[in-house]
Amino acid sequence: MDAIVAEHLSKTYPKGVRAVEDVSFRVAPGEIFGLLGPNGAGKSTTVRMLATLTKPDGGTGSVAGHDIRRDPAGVRRALGYVAQASGVDKHATGRENLTLQAQLHRVPRSEIRQRVDRVLEWVGLTDAADRMVQTYSGGMKRRLDIALGLVHEPEVLFLDEPTTGLDPETRAALWEDLLRLKHERRLAVLLTTHYLDEADRLCDRLAIVDRGRVVAEGTPAELKAAIRGDRVTLEVEQRPAEAAAVLAPLDGVLDVVPNGREVVARVLHGATAIPQLVTVLERAGITVQSVALHRPSLDDVYLFHTGHRMISDTLAPELVGQGEERR
Amino acid sequence: MGFVMDTLYLLKRHTLATVRIPIWVFMSLVSPLIWLVLYGQLFRRIVELPGFGSGSYIQFLTPGVVVMLALFSAAWGGMGTLQDLTDGVMDRMLVTPVSRAALIASRVLHTALTVAVQAAIILVVGLVMGARVPGGILGAVSVLGVSALLAAGISAVSNGLALITRREETLIAIVNFFATPLVFLSSAFIATALMPGWIRAIARANPVNWAVQGARNAMEGADWGAVASYGLLLTAFTIVCVLFATQAFRLYRRAM
């Protein structure tokens, strides 16, 4: 049985904002499933609907076999929810936060102390347990958030943007923790992120969400394999537009885009195409200064399916709108 | 069962937070204390007005200021809920099986208890300044009880407004707009007999006035029947307020 099911979930907010449109996916026990998309794509709303915090307008879903509409209480018992905004009580200690959470989750009184100790140990907060949360660093607060989601030993865990706002080192440490979690317990995890590297690293499968819709779903490898070709970036001394025009008609070149002092070509087989590309350019009197070959990244997958880049980064913004004629 | 235990667990959380940052408890005491000391001195001779019907103004004023404190302090009861909304604590708790009613009840109870302690402090200052409690221990306890009852109702309203408006500014504006007039439309500072007719009419329907009358009668120990009936009125008021807060909570859940 699937641990998390979303079936045609839809949500329109009062002011007519369509946050989520017909989102469906299934997550098996022991699997980390990612929702990848930019801010405002509808990831959090989807998670909130499955966590019984927001009522869907259409569709339904279930968590650990409990229907989110008919049995919200059952969903809450089975679920650990770590929200995007931290949910820790700043004016209490870490231990007090966890104890209250366990009490509200109806953990038997005799087990509370032991469970709290165990989860504190697990997230590495044993030494800080009796300090006010106010004094915690951002990373420690996030670890406490995750501990709050785990203290009642749920079957399903939702992590909404777990590493947003954390420094790279803390992020990496948290990734290790989450992978460890996956290996040690047979938890089903639903994770949202707008970090491509995070989705790539953590998720067994993922859905790319754009403007409230799922535009692609699969394992990171499958998604990347679905895009044909490699990306070759050629740095030229001058006339990048002319260079692009020279390369475009060649066999095996899918498209070419000039980008500053570079030309970005998508080709069927990168390794064999590179010598040909360089030769053709040299013959046209254009000197190539450097060549780089990239396997398709999730960013390319995202671009391919949505026609726009997820995060406005330095790479070929002109590629926007060039996402046709593939497959 | 779940409701009672959840309320106690949450009440413990709120109480610990208050005990750790007691500054808020004293902040809301400042202005009532100033009123008690300065007003009590400034208008000392007001009792000489024909028809005032009391021999000592500080004796008359003390229960009024106790109730004023209860109102002012409880009116901010919704701030904690707002903080929980902002911090994501509310969302986190709503994804647990916690009794929804306990989330409100614990806040209301916490305000009532805090106000009882604050009211005791004001009462002691009043005694130091020359007020007396002919009603004895029972009278003093009833003063605190009446204040706590009013505080419970006001806190429920404040929490309800917090859940509906979800904005600190709006709650502050509403509290500032209503709190002071409600005190002036009661017999906190002046005898009912000396009020203009229209204020007397409004005061009759003003829960703050019910609390003032109840507290004053209890302090004097003269008319226990009046104490009981004002107590009943306040209980009804508090029940209505809690129903309002519950409804506000439902609205909040639906708006999310």
Image (cartoon, coloured by chain):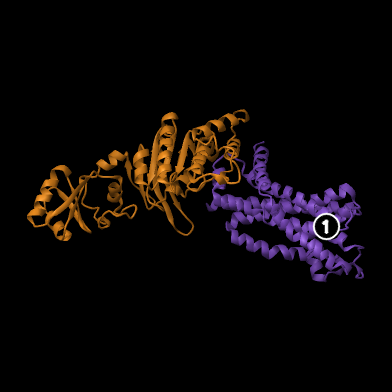
Chain colours: A orange, B purple
Residue annotated with mark 1? B63
Q: How many marks?
A: 1
Sort mark 1 into few (<14), some (14-19) or many (20+) by Cα contacts within 10 Å: many
Of A318 and A21, nearer the camera is A318
Q: Position of residue A91 (x, y in %)?
A: 60, 46
Q: Classify A13 as above or below A166.
A: below
Of A34 and A238, nearer the camera is A238
Q: Position of residue A128 (x, y in %)?
A: 55, 38
Say left or right for B165 vs A234.
right
Q: Position of residue A78 (x, y in %)?
A: 51, 35
Report in which chain the residue with disc 1 lies.
B
Q: Residue at x 87, y 66 (%)?
A: B44
Q: Residue at x 42, y 50 (%)?
A: A42
Tell me, yes or no, if residue B82 can be seen here.
Answer: yes
The image quarter containing residue A102 is top right
Say left or right for A103 vs A81.
right
Q: Residue at x 90, y 49 (%)?
A: B136
Of A217 and B116, nearer the camera is B116
Q: Classify A186 as above or below A168.
A: above
Q: Classify A1 as above or below B71.
A: above
